[in-house]
Image (tube, rainbow, N blue to C red):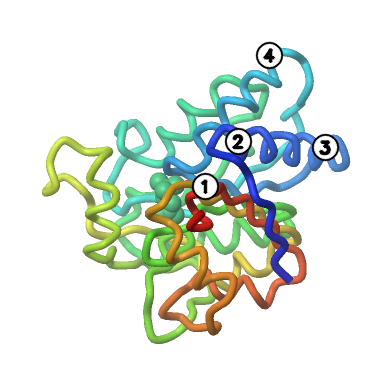
Amino acid sequence: MIQLCRCRDYEDISQRAAELLTAQLTWKKDSTLGLATGGSPVGLYRKLRERFAEGLVDFSEVKTVNLDEYRGLAPENPQSYRYFMEENLFRHVNIHPENTYVPNGLEKDSETACRDYDAVIQRLGGIDLQLLGIGRNGHIGFNEPSDQFSSGTHCVKLSENTIEANQRFFERREEVPTEAYTMGCGAILRARRILLLASGRDKAEAVHAMLYGPITPQLPASILQLHENVLVLADEEALGQ
Ligand code: PGA
């Protein structure tokens, strides 16, 4: 079941998400968090850094698995998702680096990269809380619209729509990687709780289809309708209001 929480704006989303994550870590100090990159969680990570500085949240026992990584980018590349996580959260809080996992973008053999990552998720005992954004085309992680739902970690060719949306983080369009490793929809669905953040008018169509449309791999986020515990924090613009 998807629960929808209407938020005023991006700031409101970030605040509520930070409260929820803090509550999760108070309840279970050694939670495994599934984390996301992109614009949607930046405000949340800022608030978590602030909360950590105030002594309100403790990451010492937390483990994290990120949704995805560009294939071919090194961790120290500023456009990589590993770098994003270091800058936005990890290096500011007391998380142990060895407890943070992001798919290995430098692993050329995609079978190895994907198998290794699925093994990590399994070894951690699954994901307690998975954080998600949503793409303009309804993707979650880098699970792009397709003819079937994916299960485990796999290598994807990014859609034109996604490359265009991600271009804002790169100087030139040619620099945007065209492939990525991503956790599958099956793995996302196996998380015990899911928290999806959606802000801005360009998400309105995808959010509406996710909540009220048919469950279809053409709109990967629609599979969340099958999950028992999903909270969507969406602002007025993302709800088309
Ligand atoms: P965004 O991306 O948070 O940068 O809008 C979300 C997504 O593409 O999943």
Residue 13 to residue 201: above or below: above
Judged by depth in the image, the label closer to the viewer, 4 or 3, is 4
Which residue is painted at 37% across and 54% down in the image?
202
Residue 148 to residue 211: above or below: below
Task: Give the spatial CA distance, label 1 vs label 2.
Answer: 13 Å
Looking at mark 1, is its residue's CB closer than 8 Å to ligand 1?
yes
Residue marked by disc 4: 53
For residue 187, side relative to residue 54 (left or right) = left
Tell me which numbered mark, 2 or 4, is placed earlier along the sequence. 2
Looking at the rendered structure, the kind of residue marked 2 is Ser
Q: Which mark is residue 14?
A: 2
Looking at the rendered structure, the kind of residue marked 1 is Ala
Looking at the rendered structure, the kind of residue marked 4 is Ala
Which residue is painted at 81% across and 38% down in the image?
23
For the N terminus, the image quarter is bottom right
Which residue is painted at 29% across and 44% down in the image?
73
Task: Give the spatial CA distance, label 2 vs label 3.
Answer: 21 Å
Residue marked by disc 1: 36
Residue marked by disc 3: 29
- Tell me which corner region of the image, top left, top right, bottom left or bottom right, holds residue 47: top right
Task: Give the spatial CA distance, label 1 vs label 4.
Answer: 22 Å
Task: Mark 2 and mark 4 in contact? Answer it, CB < 8 Å.
Answer: no
Judged by depth in the image, the label closer to the viewer, 2 or 3, is 2
Tell me which numbered mark, 1 or 2, is placed earlier along the sequence. 2
Judged by depth in the image, the label closer to the viewer, 1 or 2, is 2
Closer to the camera, 187 or 76?
187
Tell me which numbered mark, 1 or 3, is placed earlier along the sequence. 3
